[in-house]
Amino acid sequence: MKADVENSTLKLFSDIKQMIATARHKVAVKVNREIILLYWNIGNRIRKDILNESRAQYGKQIVKKLAEKLTIEYGRGWSENQLRHCLRTAEVFSEEQILSAVQRELNWTHIKTLSYINNELKRQFYMEMCIIEHWDTRLLNERIGSMLFERTAISKKPEELIKKELKQLSENKKLSNDLVFRSPYFLDFLGLADTYSEKDLENAILSEIQRFIIEIGSDFAFLSRQKHITIDNEDYYIDLLFYHRSLRRLVVIDLKLDKFKPQHKGQMELYLRWLEKYEKRNNEESPIGLILCSEGSSEHVELLMLDESNIKVAQYLTELPPKNILEEQLNKAIRKAKQLNRLNDETD
């Protein structure tokens, strides 16, 4: 009798707990929707009714006075900066875009952060990735600060192809290889000394596996280190083996201390074909390989046509250069890749 009462109570408690959690979530979603729409509408009203005036100073004075009056009436939260955030959001996003963002559960801080990304395609990239990978606002800021867009292969494509791929991402909620893999990877958190071995690098990654997965992407799941395989009675060891949930692929990560060399391709192909034959499940796509090197070798990658294969080559950095130098290097790589794409198109 006592056990029955206890079991019934636990079942009832569990059901009611779920009901409360569901109701709270619905309320939070509704509140979030109304807050974002309120801020966007305020910004839109300011934009239409005041700042269309040709006198910029006049508009600034109006926003300042309006903030003072709203603060007196409603208290903190209506500063001049807040009104300018509202205005910026209305300038950048259409009502349709705002409604879409709200329905996909982005909050005001997400929207506000995204609105200050000047490039429209870059802004759309971060918005879609935010939604797909469920980034909180702290991670969104980190991704923007680390120039994630510039490090992905998609940034190096012509604008029309970027638009097409982002549209597919929005509609199908499916990541492509060009959105998942990037270069360089930032591994400065490993704390490696000036000189280290491949084993040191591997050990450091495993001791910081959570931060490593945050850097390479949240859909990666770690499976194994030094996975032993045997081919023709010879032993081979795969450095790191992951699984990517969205791509539905096994992912081999091979660590190299030097520049990419052609023989690395052959070694990776061997690993991938073994995994294809012995480890791939029926519902999975073919395995993919990522060769992480300490230095880039773009011409080798181009001549071996690795971008068209299941093998990706990327650089990793254990120490970050100054941001302005990094930004210059990434933008230079993007310009070079787009120029090459144009030349290839003209040749075709």
Image (tube, rainbow, N blue to C red):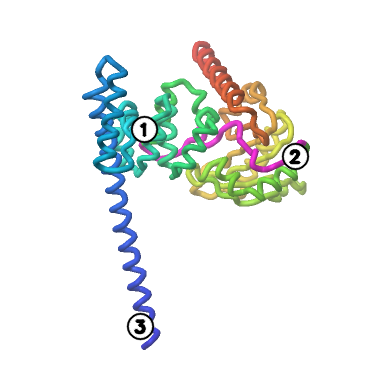
Does the magenta-highlighted stretch encompass residue 162? no
Residue type at the position of mark 3:
Val
Residue holding disc 3: 5
Q: CA distance from mark 3 to mark 1?
A: 57 Å
The mark found on residue 215 in the picture is: none
Q: Position of residue 133 (x, y in %)?
A: 45, 43
Q: Earlier in the sequence, mark 3 or mark 2?
A: 3
Label 3 sits on a secondary structure element that is helix
Q: CA distance from mark 1 to mark 2?
A: 44 Å
Label 2 sits on a secondary structure element that is loop
Q: Position of residue 336 (x, y in %)?
A: 57, 17
Tell me the magenta residue range. 171-194
**Mark 2 burial class by Cα count in 10 Å: few <14, some 14-19, many 20+:** few
Residue holding disc 1: 81
User: Is 11 on the left-hand or right-hand side of 245?
Assistant: left
Residue type at the position of mark 1:
Asn
- Give 218 or 222, whichever is nearer the viewer: 218
Disc 1 versus disc 2: nearer the observer: 1
The mark found on residue 193 in the picture is: 2
Q: Residue at x 49, y 48 (%)?
A: 283
- Give 52 or 272, whichever is nearer the viewer: 52
